[in-house]
Image: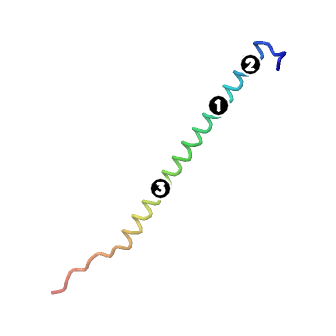
């Protein structure tokens, strides 16, 4: 490492910075995709439970006098 000049170090540091920034951006994008998928699944489950609850509730019959 003693024979590296200034430009080599600049390229190494720049390449490392670009790699880290790209990795962070990819991770954030994936996190957002997973969050959106989870929200959609929660919404589907809520709708399914509401439909099941509505189907299981029996309307009350009027009393015969």
Query: Quarter-wise, where is residue 31 in the image?
Result: top right
**Residue closer to the observer: 61 or 16:** 16
Image x and y of residue 54, in percent: 36, 68
Task: Check whether the beta carbons of the residues at disc 1 and disc 3 lie within 8 A of each other.
Answer: no
Work out whether mark 1 precedes mark 3 in sequence or the reverse, and give the earlier one.
Answer: 1
At 34% across and 73% down in the image, what residue appears?
Answer: 57
Query: How has the structure been colored for display?
Result: rainbow
What label does residue 22 carry, if any?
A: 1
At 56% across and 47% down in the image, what residue appears?
Answer: 34
- Is residue 55 left or right of 18 when viewed as pictured? left
Mark 3: secondary structure:
helix
Q: Which residue is mark 2?
A: 11
| Label 3 vs label 2, nearer the camera | 2
Image x and y of residue 15, in percent: 71, 24
* 27 in relation to 58, above or below: above
Q: CA distance from mark 2 to mark 1?
A: 16 Å
Instruction: Indicate the quadrant containing the C terminus: top left, top right, bottom left or bottom right.
Output: bottom left
Mark 1: secondary structure:
helix
Task: Check whether the beta carbons of the residues at disc 3 and disc 2 lie within 8 A of each other.
Answer: no
Image x and y of residue 19, in percent: 69, 29
| Label 1 vs label 3, nearer the camera | 1
Q: Residues within 10 Å of mark 3 (few under 14, many from 20)?
A: few
Q: Which residue is mark 3?
A: 42
Q: Residues within 10 Å of mark 2 (few under 14, many from 20)?
A: few
Q: CA distance from mark 3 to mark 2?
A: 46 Å
At 67% across and 26% down in the image, what residue appears?
Answer: 18
Mark 2: secondary structure:
helix
**Residue closer to the observer: 8 or 39:** 8
């Amino acid at each position: 490492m003693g024979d590296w000049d200034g430009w080599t170090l600049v390229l190494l540091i720049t390449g490392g910075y670009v790699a880290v920034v790209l990795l962070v951006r990819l991770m954030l994008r994936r996190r957002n995709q997973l969050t959106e998928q989870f929200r959609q699944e929660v919404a589907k489950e809520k709708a399914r439970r509401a439909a099941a609850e509505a189907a299981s509730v029996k309307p009350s019959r009027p009393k015969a006098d």
